[in-house]
Amino acid sequence: MPFAQEQLARIKPLWDRMLAHRFLRETRDGTISDERFAVWMRQDYLFVEAAIPFIAALIPKAPRRHWEALSGVISALFDELKLFEERARAVGVDLRGAPPAFTNHAYIQFLMATAAHASYAEAYTVLYTAEKAYLDSWSVVKAGISPQSKWYPFVENWAGERFAQYVKYLEDELNRLAEEAGPAERERMAHYFELTAKYEIAFWEMAATGEGWPGAD
Ligand code: MP5
């Protein structure tokens, strides 16, 4: 079985928990408060911004065949930042209104530490898992949200055909990297897969609860 499929099957209970998260359900049903959605917007804007140096740090570790695609990811991230800025203006959210919350801060540090210290295949596993998590999560939202919703542009961004094709490309390449990896590296890739899924759940939880810094706020 290809690596990505094998890992998704292995951590299915965790993945299903992510997809059942109330933040996604409430966004889908239109019952999420503007305040809660704004928490996610502010935090994810910072996350997307931080993903740019993460991808940039992967390029020197990447095989030549990945350079163009990774450069394309950086452009796509700049487009995403513009999408956040456009929506924030439209609904009156200050994107710079909060520093990174604990969970977001930890996730960003995890990205940067992975890019710096893990192998390329391990860091690529994190990239794939985070992108696949957003494709699947926003597909849950798409399955019920009104196309008139002010949040619909986010749904179109991550649950649309273009993003699905990009995730498919990442998946094929991840499977190739896993085939080339030895058993020990494959094991570490599996570990990163699970850890990234847990960060994704924690991120929805942070948005849903409005968590800042535990014990300090
Ligand atoms: C993504 C994201 C998707 N924006 N935020 C989190 C917490 N996880 C995954 O990544 P991208 O690069 O914005 O498509």
Image: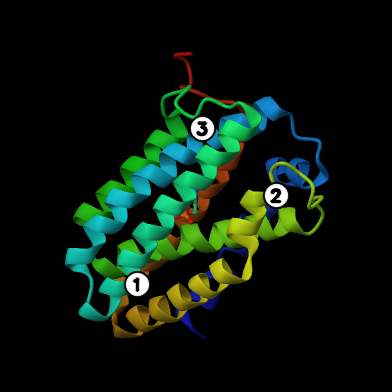
Which residue is at 28% across, 48% downward? 112
Q: For residue 127, which quarter of the picture?
A: bottom left
- Residue 74 at x, y percent in the picture: 35, 58
Query: Foreground residue, 113 or 37?
Result: 37
The residue carrying mark 3 has its beta carbon less than 8 Å from ligand 1: no
- 3D distance between C-alphas at marks 3 and 2: 17 Å
Instruction: In the rendered view, tell whether residue 155 sits above or below residue 65.
Output: above
Specify whether 185 is left or right of 197: left
Tell me which label, 3 or 2, sits earlier in the chain. 3
Residue 152 image label = 2
The coloring applied to the image is rainbow
Amino acid carrying label 1: it is Ala
Which of the two discs, 3 and 2, sits closer to the camera? 2
- 3D distance between C-alphas at marks 3 and 1: 27 Å
Report if the CB atoms under discs 3 and 1 are less than 8 Å apart.
no
Which residue is at 36% across, 50% downward? 51
Amino acid carrying label 3: it is Arg
Amino acid carrying label 2: it is Tyr
- Residue 57 at x, y percent in the picture: 22, 56
- 3D distance between C-alphas at marks 2 and 1: 27 Å
Q: For residue 188, which quarter of the picture?
A: bottom left
Is residue 87 among the parts visible in the rendering? yes
Query: Foreground residue, 19 or 78?
Result: 78
Q: Which residue is mark 3?
A: 42
Secondary structure state at the residue bearing disc 2: helix
Q: Which residue is mark 1?
A: 69
Classify mark 2: residues with Cα within 10 Å, few (<14), some (14-19) or many (20+). Answer: some
Tell me which label, 2 or 1, sits earlier in the chain. 1
Classify mark 3: residues with Cα within 10 Å, few (<14), some (14-19) or many (20+). Answer: many
Specify whether 142 is left or right of 182: right
